[in-house]
């Protein structure tokens, strides 16, 4: 399960991707000496309020100096935007220096705390009784920080935090050079398409704990590519796969030179053109400062993690059986029994249901005209619409067959003629913009691919989307509720600047077949497929059912084309409901896989794009809804059959392929089991509820602790500032 950090609360710094000169020089006429001046010194061991439990570790901190180059770099990366927004240089530089001081205080405190934890906590994976002695024996700040993070003095420890920090730094440098090279290659003037279609959230999101490894080892396999000796593309490891399209040695060198020139400009002088080898990027003091900054942020974050875990155990699992969380559940359930006594309050709550907004209780519902109680639920909707000509013909039919005296407002002949138009609806894959839009998300796979894509044979090539997320799960996060194995349904011809797409057409029967087969492919579940009883021929006798208040009501079952259900093999709907969002890699539930398959088909086919932004689809009330009656009826019937049920119905917009994602029983929705396995498996109800309780009760734990540490250790005794050494920065407005 991915760790869900509550808050980091650290100062962020990064390599400047592009530098906009302010028109004011930030340094003196002797830039090297000026930039290397110490402008503040911090030593928290001098405070009179020192925590006695850390006495043994005082000597580990000593004095930390903030040099002027750090403040200028921080200004370039963060502060300049404040000046552009109207803040004065004096206010901005004062704020930034204060942040750097805060950061130094937190690094010193975190260092002592982590050394103590490393030495005294025998359950700690980096347990080292001689931690302090080892730390003090190291001869550089970098080595000390790497040891503190990973328990190593040779780069081969059990932790990976330092390697992740180095990867983050190298990646940001490559990204900065990419930006300059992109301009040189005139990529900004390429002819991208303008078509768009919604895409899933999280595309190309890299995992927090990822770094590329060399085969058979834990060593970092990623380097910086500048084009100069020692920094060639073939020596850049994994970056070679991520390289800028069209890159050449000559354009890369030119881009790197522009990057260095921006850092060495007379306005900033972050590198020294006289004394430093500018072609050797990793030898630059500025780059070393950035690496140290990355390590410092991870040291602070690691301290927060340790502190949060301590507080989490004290509060949420003090008795070892999640008694506090169980009590929160019961309390929340009691309040919902009271709050959701009426349908209207419950309906409103349904709209805000999410991974962190739970519904534990559903109210009783009224009986319908057949004496059955309705159910609430959520549905996906794949809309296959009429084309323009069919829509025009439908409008004519509506005008010709209006009859306000009849339920529905139209004569039976209208529905018969509408059925003929529905039979002629053809749909195609709607993802052309994922090829020829602003961003090309497509990638080609072959029959020998490791991906088990839909329709795969040894001879079958296919085009899928979002390669990083779908085919590289070691590095990138999986997309939420998106299987990623449904190829573009048609022929794809690559051309010089775009793709020629020849989509396959599907009628409703073909679409239903694709729908059912793809769910089976992804989930591994069998489907109970209903027979198609749709005739499309309507008379007074066949269209109308019971008479209510002197008026015959339309029997909307006439408009249901087909229905079925995914067989999850569960004994109860409650089990299906509880399993729905189990998404941990390797442990995905059948319910989650089926949900992901249908959601992907929505992205591929539906023209009702509003459904794509909803948590579990559209909310469907037990009684009257705002939907068209055909959709309302089919949804209600499918929801009665439970999650995994589906139906196809006709309507005035076209065909609706409805899939039930979630349903509510009358009364309590869950009987949670508060065990380690359930709480720690991503996507279980227990896991989601625990994380929510944790967030509610510990949401500000890190920021509160940060304030406590700063209030104790940041004082005139521990911090000395030399304002005269950075006064020229404060005076830039003058």
Image (tube, rainbow, N blue to C red):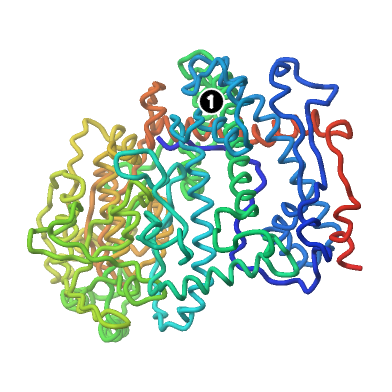
Q: Could you say which is closer to the camera, residue 651 or residue 366? A: 651
User: 493 and 187: which one is in front?
Assistant: 187
- Residue found 52% across the figure and 69% down from its top: 179
Packing grade of label 1 (10 A; few <14, some 14-19, many >=20) is some
Q: What is the secondary structure assignment of the residue under circle 1?
A: helix
Residue 79: x and y in percent read 73, 59
Q: Left or right: 461 with respect to 136?
A: left
Question: Along the line of sight, which residue is nearer the eye, 699 or 105?
Answer: 105
The answer to whether residue 86 is above or below residue 621 is: below
Asked whether residue 667 is in view, the answer is no
Is residue 476 toward the left or the right of residue 495 in the image?
right
Quadrant of residue 190 within the rendered picture? bottom left
- Position of residue 1 relative to residue 117, above or below, is below
How far across and down, in percent of the image, does residue 511 sit?
18, 65
Which quadrant of the structure image shows residue 301?
top right
On-image quarter of the C terminus: bottom right
Residue situated furthest front in the rendering:
275
x and y, in percent, of residue 253 in the image: 50, 71
Q: Is 432 on the left-hand or right-hand side of 242?
A: left
Is residue 392 at least partly visible in the picture?
Answer: yes
Please tell me which residue is depicted at 74% across the width and 45% down the height of the picture.
Answer: 100
Residue in the image at 52% along x and 27% along y: 334
Looking at the rendered structure, the number of numbered marks drawn on it comes to 1
**For residue 142, above or below residue 309:** below
Residue 168 x, y percent position in the rendering: 51, 50
Residue corresponding to mark 1: 328
Quarter containing the N terminus: top left
């Amino acid at each position: 399960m991915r760790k869900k950090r509550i808050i980091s609360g650290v100062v962020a710094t990064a390599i400047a991707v592009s530098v906009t000169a302010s028109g004011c020089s930030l340094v003196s006429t002797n830039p090297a000496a000026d930039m290397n001046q110490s402008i503040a010194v911090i030593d928290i061991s001098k405070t009179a309020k020192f925590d006695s439990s850390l006495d043994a570790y005082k000597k580990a901190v000593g004095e930390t100096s903030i040099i002027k180059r750090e403040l200028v770099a921080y200004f370039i990366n963060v502060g300049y935007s404040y000046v552009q927004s109207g803040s004065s240089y004096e206010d901005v530089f004062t704020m930034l220096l204060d942040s750097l001081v805060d950061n130094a205080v937190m690094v010193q405190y975190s260092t002592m705390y982590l050394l103590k934890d490393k030495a005294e906590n025998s359950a700690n994976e980096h347990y080292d009784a001689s931690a302090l002695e080892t730390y003090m024996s190291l001869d550089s700040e970098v080595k000390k920080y790497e040891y503190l993070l990973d328990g190593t003095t040779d780069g081969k420890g059990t932790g990976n935090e330092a390697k992740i920090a180095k990867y983050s730094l190298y990646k940001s440098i490559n990204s900065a050079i990419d930006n300059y090279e992109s301009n040189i290659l005139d990529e900004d003037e390429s002819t991208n398409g303008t078509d768009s279609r919604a895409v899933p959230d999280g595309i190309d999101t890299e995992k927090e704990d990822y770094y590329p490894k060399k085969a058979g080892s834990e060593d970092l396999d990623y380097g910086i590519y500048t084009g100069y000796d020692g920094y060639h593309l073939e020596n850049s490891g994994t970056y070679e796969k991520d390289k800028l399209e069209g890159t050449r040695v000559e354009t890369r060198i030119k881009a790197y030179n522009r990057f260095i020139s921006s850092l060495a400009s007379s306005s900033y002088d972050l590198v020294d053109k006289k004394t430093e080898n500018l072609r050797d990027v990793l030898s630059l003091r500025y780059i070393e400062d950035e690496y140290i900054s990355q390590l410092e942020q991870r040291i602070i974050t690691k301290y927060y993690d340790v502190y949060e875990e301590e507080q989490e155990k004290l509060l949420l699992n003090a008795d070892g059986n999640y008694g506090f969380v169980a009590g929160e559940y019961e309390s929340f359930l009691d309040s919902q029994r009271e709050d959701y006594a009426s349908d209207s309050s419950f309906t409103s709550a349904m709209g805000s249901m999410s991974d962190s907004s739970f519904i534990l209780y559903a109210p009783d519902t009224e009986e319908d005209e057949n004496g059955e109680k309705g159910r609430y639920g959520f549905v996906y909707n794949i809309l296959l619409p009429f084309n323009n000509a069919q829509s025009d013909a439908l409008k004519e039919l509506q005008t010709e067959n209006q009859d306000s005296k009849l339920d529905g407002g139209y004569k039976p002949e209208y529905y018969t003629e509408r059925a003929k138009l529905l039979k002629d609806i053809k749909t195609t894959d709607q993802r052309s913009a994922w090829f020829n839009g602003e961003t090309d998300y497509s990638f080609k796979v072959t029959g020998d691919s490791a991906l088990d894509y839909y329709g795969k044979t040894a001879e079958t090539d296919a085009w899928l989307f979002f390669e990083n997320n779908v085919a590289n799960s070691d590095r990138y996060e999986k997309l939420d509720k998106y299987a990623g194995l449904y190829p573009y349904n048609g022929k794809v011809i690559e051309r010089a600047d775009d793709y020629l797409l020849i989509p396959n057409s599907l009628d409703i029967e073909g679409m239903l077949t694709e729908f059912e087969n793809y769910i089976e492919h992804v989930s591994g579940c069998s489907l109970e497929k209903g027979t198609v009883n749709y005739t499309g021929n309507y008379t007074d006798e066949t269209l109308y059912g019971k008479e209510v208040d002197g008026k015959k009501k339309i029997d909307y079952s006439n408009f249901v084309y087909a229905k079925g259900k995914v067989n999850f093999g569960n004994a109860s709907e409650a089990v299906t409901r509880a399993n729905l969002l189990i998404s941990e890699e390797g442990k995905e539930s059948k319910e989650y896989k089926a949900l992901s398959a249908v959601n992907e088909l929505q992205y591929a086919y539906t023209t009702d794009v509003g459904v794509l932004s909803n948590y579990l689809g559209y909310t469907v009330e037990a009684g009257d809804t705002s939907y068209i009656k055909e959709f309302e009826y089919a949804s209600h019937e499918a929801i009665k059959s439970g999650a995994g049920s589906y139906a196809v119905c006709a309507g005035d917009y076209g065909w609706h392929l409805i899939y039930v994602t979630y349903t509510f029983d009358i009364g309590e929705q869950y009987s949670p089991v508060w065990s380690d396995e359930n709480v720690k498996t991503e996507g279980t109800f227990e896991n989601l509820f625990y994380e929510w309780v944790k967030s509610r009760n510990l949401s500000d734990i890190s920021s509160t602790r940060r304030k406590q540490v700063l209030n104790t250790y940041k004082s005139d005794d521990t911090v000395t500032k030399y304002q005269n050494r950075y006064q020229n920065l404060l005076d830039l407005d003058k």
